[in-house]
């Protein structure tokens, strides 16, 4: 880990993101495998086109014993912050205190499909963080803009639930370092983590000691398989969507062809997904996904954990998700836990 005054908070060291794009019983099966593999936290992605994240998380809670679990990441636009606080608190009750909350600003293009404009994202996420914590302490909450809540209160208390903010922009990263239990840093390349490290350190300069320890977690798209070609093929769809939503500054940082980037964005907007996937280059996969054989994935994760305290393997995981979790367990055993790569 590079120099900095952050320490890994207890709990999140090695996590996975599970996408509920199939029956929730299948998601619970994967979570059971993850728990058996020694993975400590399972995040379930939260998008309206998939199964409901909290229903999937409740099924996971009933099928597991130790793994921490939560949405990764939910946003305060398509789910009201008070409802989000209540759903997370209920998950904590259902799981005997294992709930965590992954919170972010949401995807702008996805929210527009719901007629929602993603205004003041950093301010809204910070206000939601405060509201959740106040409600979990049993307090009555009233706020002004951007949330405008009047005398809301939960009828039950839940105690502290760790909140990890998802993001990569400097303002969101600094907010996470100042206020949250941790950061789920969106990125898969060391070049991006070097930039985020500086923002984390700036945020930590203004962190209140009452907020406790802070976890800088890499939240990277992973595609792992015994055959490299299979892993690369499975990486193309998520990388296409990452490219479509990433800022142009990221494209320039990784020297990506702008014409190819625009082709992907146009194809996805038109619903021509296979065309977009075919346009994904090797350079794009290297920039936005940890993809390859177990050895290749282990090497990249070790490089990221020179910056990060923890690692969360995000979608797609691989061409076969059950096998991917087993392969990740082998990577975990090689890299070790509680502090990243062996020095």
Image (spheres, rainbow, N blue to C red):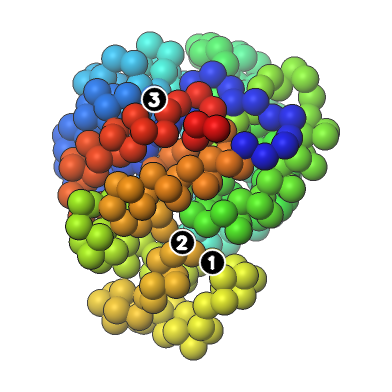
**Mark 3 sits on what residue?**
40
State the residue in front, 307 or 241: 307
Residues at circles 1 and 2 in contact by the CB criterion of under 8 Å: yes
Q: Position of residue 153 (x, y in %)?
A: 59, 20
Q: Quadrant of residue 18?
A: top left
**Which circle marks residue 288 in the picture?**
2
In this view, 95 is above or below 319? above
Decide which of tag 1 and tag 3 comes sooner along the chain: 3
Left/right placement of residue 51 relative to residue 299 reads left
Residue at point 25%, 40% (across, down): 327
**Which circle marks residue 246 in the picture?**
1
Q: Secondary structure at mark 2?
A: helix
Quick one: which residue is furthest to the front in this view?
343
Q: Residues within 10 Å of mark 3 (few under 14, many from 20)?
A: some
Decide which of tag 2 and tag 3 comes sooner along the chain: 3
Numbered disc in front, either 1 or 3:
3
Distance, label 1 to label 3, CA atoms, is 29 Å
């Amino acid at each position: 880990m590079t120099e900095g005054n952050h320490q890994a908070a207890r709990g999140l060291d090695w996590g996975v993101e599970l996408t509920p794009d199939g029956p929730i019983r299948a998601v619970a099966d994967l979570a059971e495998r993850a728990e058996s593999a020694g993975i400590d936290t399972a995040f379930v992605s939260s998008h309206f086109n998939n199964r409901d994240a909290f229903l999937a998380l409740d099924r996971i809670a009933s099928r597991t014993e130790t793994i921490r679990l939560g949405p990764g990441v939910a946003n305060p636009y398509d789910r009201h912050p008070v409802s989000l606080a209540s759903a997370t608190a209920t998950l904590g009750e259902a799981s005997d205190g294992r709930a965590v909350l992954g919170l972010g600003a949401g995807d702008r293009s996805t929210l527009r499909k719901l007629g929602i404009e993603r205004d003041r994202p950093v301010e809204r996420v910070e206000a939601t963080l405060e509201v959740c914590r106040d409600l979990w302490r049993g307090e009555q909450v009233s706020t002004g803009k951007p949330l405008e809540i009047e005398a809301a209160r939960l009828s039950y208390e839940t105690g502290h639930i760790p909140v990890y903010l998802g993001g990569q922009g400097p303002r969101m990263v600094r907010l996470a370092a100042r206020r949250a239990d941790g950061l789920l840093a969106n990125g898969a390349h060391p070049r991006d983590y070097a930039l985020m490290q500086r923002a984390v350190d700036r945020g930590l300069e203004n962190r209140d000691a009452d907020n406790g320890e802070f976890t800088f977690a890499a939240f990277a798209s992973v595609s792992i398989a015994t055959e490299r070609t299979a892993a690369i093929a499975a990486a193309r769809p998520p990388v296409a969507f990452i490219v479509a939503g990433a800022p142009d500054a990221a494209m320039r940082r990784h020297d990506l062809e702008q014409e190819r980037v625009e082709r992907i964005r146009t194809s996805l907007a038109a619903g021509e997904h296979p065309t977009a996937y075919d346009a994904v280059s090797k350079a794009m996969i290297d920039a936005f996904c940890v993809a390859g054989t177990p050895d290749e994935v282990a090497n990249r994760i070790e490089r990221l954990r020179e910056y990060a305290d923890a690692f969360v393997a995000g979608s797609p995981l691989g061409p076969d998700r059950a096998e991917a979790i087993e392969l990740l367990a082998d990577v975990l055993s090689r890299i070790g836990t509680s502090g990243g790569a062996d020095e």
